[in-house]
Structure formats: C-alpha cells, structure tokens
Image (spheres, grey):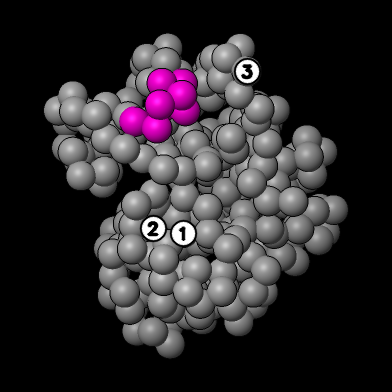
Amino acid sequence: MDLNSDLGEGYGAWRMGDDAAMLAIVTSANVACGFHAGDPAGILQTLRGAAAHGVAVGAHVSYPDLVGFGRRPMQPSSAELVADVVYQIGALQGLAQAAGTRVRYVKPHGALYNTIAHDERQGNDVIAAMLAVDPGLTLLALAGSPLIARARERGLAVVAEAFADRAYHDDGTLVPRHLPGAVLHDADAVAQRMLGWVQTGAIPSITGRSVRVQADSICVHGDSPGAVEMARRLRQRLVQAGVVLRAFTA
C-alpha cells in the first residue's frame, strides 16, 4: 500500500504543513507546482527532502488559483488547461532534476481533481497534457471515478486513491469540504478506519453505511491540522498489522 501526502505548499513567508516530518512517514509526495501553492525555493527544498528519504515524487497540478488554494471550480478552455498542466509538470521536472529525483506521476489538486473525476472534457485535457509531456507518467485519481477507465483507454497507467482524512458519501464520492464532518481530525479513529478498509475493502460513509472503495494509495492532506501525527499513527497501525508500505511507482 502507498501512503501519499500533498507537500511543497508553502508560499514565501506563509508556511503550510511540515514537509520534513511528513517525508519521513509517507512513500509518495504530491508536490505543488506553483499554481495553487508553492514557491520555487520551497518546492526545491521539499524535492530535496523527498530524494533524501527515497520518497516518490508526483506533480500536484492545479487550476491557477493561489488566492483560493486551488479549491475553486474553474472552466478554462481546453487549450488553456492542457498548457497549464504541461507547464506545471515541466516546471516540477526541472526542479526535481536539480534535486536529484524525478517526477513519476501526476495528481491533480483540489477543484481540478474533483472536476475531472466526472467532467469528461477537462479530464481528457489533463490526460492529453500528461501524454504530451511523458506517456510514462502515472495518474493518481479518485477511486471509482469514470476518469480512471478513460485514462487507461488512452494508454496511461492509473492508480486509484482513498482519503484517510475525508468523509465519504454513500455512493463513494467525497463529502464537500464546506459540509459538517467532511474533514476528519481524530488520528486514532482515522488510523483504525483505514486499517479496516485495507483489510476489508470497505469504508464507513458519513451515514455509517459500508462503502466499497478499490484503491492502492492512501492520502493524508499535509495542510490539515495534526496531519503529521495522523500520518504517523496511520503508518504505525498499518505496519503493525503487517501491511507493506511502498510507493506505487518504480
């Protein structure tokens, strides 16, 4: 099982999360590319940390939305979206090379992630951008989304992910962040919840129903309060249960 987190999201004097601590816990790092968060110096520092810890690196591409942290839906043209994603992957590739590592996958961020899970046009744009830059990149996508099949049909490798710190609806979609109970904060409860999912393939929805979620990566958001402790306890619980943790990319 892979354990990933969104990192590199500091911007100038504004620090977001504890990348150094998270990189000692996770197996994959979704690194901001400057569109929703992240400045070049901070991104480079995070990439150097990932290289030192042997953590796989992914491009955490986003809508151009620094003010909204990439969490506001947008409707860019296909030409704009393809170019934006190509630009972000390319920028991270250059920084990764300087840090002694490389970009192995792409995970869209925030509103873009949620939109392309079901929006065929924008999803195809992200796929096209990845194919244009490097067809060998893997797409990290929401478990159960139609995007997964479309990306595989176009020749991309795809890995589905589940969220440790987010609540699910009965249909397997994520509860929007603005709704009560959407974001989970109890580290012990989250760790036990995800161990149960790894063992059974089912996760409790926000209404208490059992939802089947098929995925090979678990995300803990790096900007959540107590994120490091949550990731640490989750890793401990999984390892104690005999779960092997490793990146989904070579």
Residue 144 is tagged as none
Left or right position of 203 against 36? left
Amino acid carrying mark 1 in the image:
Pro
Residue at 18 percent across and 28 percent down: it is 209
Q: Which residues are magenta?
A: 194-202
Residue 193, horizontal then vertical, whole percent: 38, 21
Res 51 quadrant in image:
top right
Name the residue carrying label 3.
242
Residue at 72 percent across and 41 percent down: it is 55
On-image quarter of the N terminus: top right
Do tag 1 and tag 2 residues touch (Cβ < 8 Å)?
yes
Residue 237, horizontal then vertical, whole percent: 54, 15
Residue 148 can be seen, yes or no = yes
Amino acid carrying mark 3 in the image:
Gly
Residue at 33 percent across and 63 percent down: it is 146
Q: Earlier in the sequence, mark 2 or mark 3?
A: 2
Amino acid carrying mark 2 in the image:
Tyr
Q: Nearer the viewer, mark 1 or mark 3?
A: 3
Q: Residues within 10 Å of mark 3 (few under 14, many from 20)?
A: few
Give the Cα separation between the discs numbered 2 and 3. Answer: 31 Å
Q: Earlier in the sequence, mark 1 or mark 2?
A: 1
Name the residue carrying label 1.
108
Name the residue carrying label 2.
113
Q: Earlier in the sequence, mark 1 or mark 3?
A: 1
Query: Element under label 3?
Result: loop
Residue 103, horizontal then vertical, whole percent: 69, 59
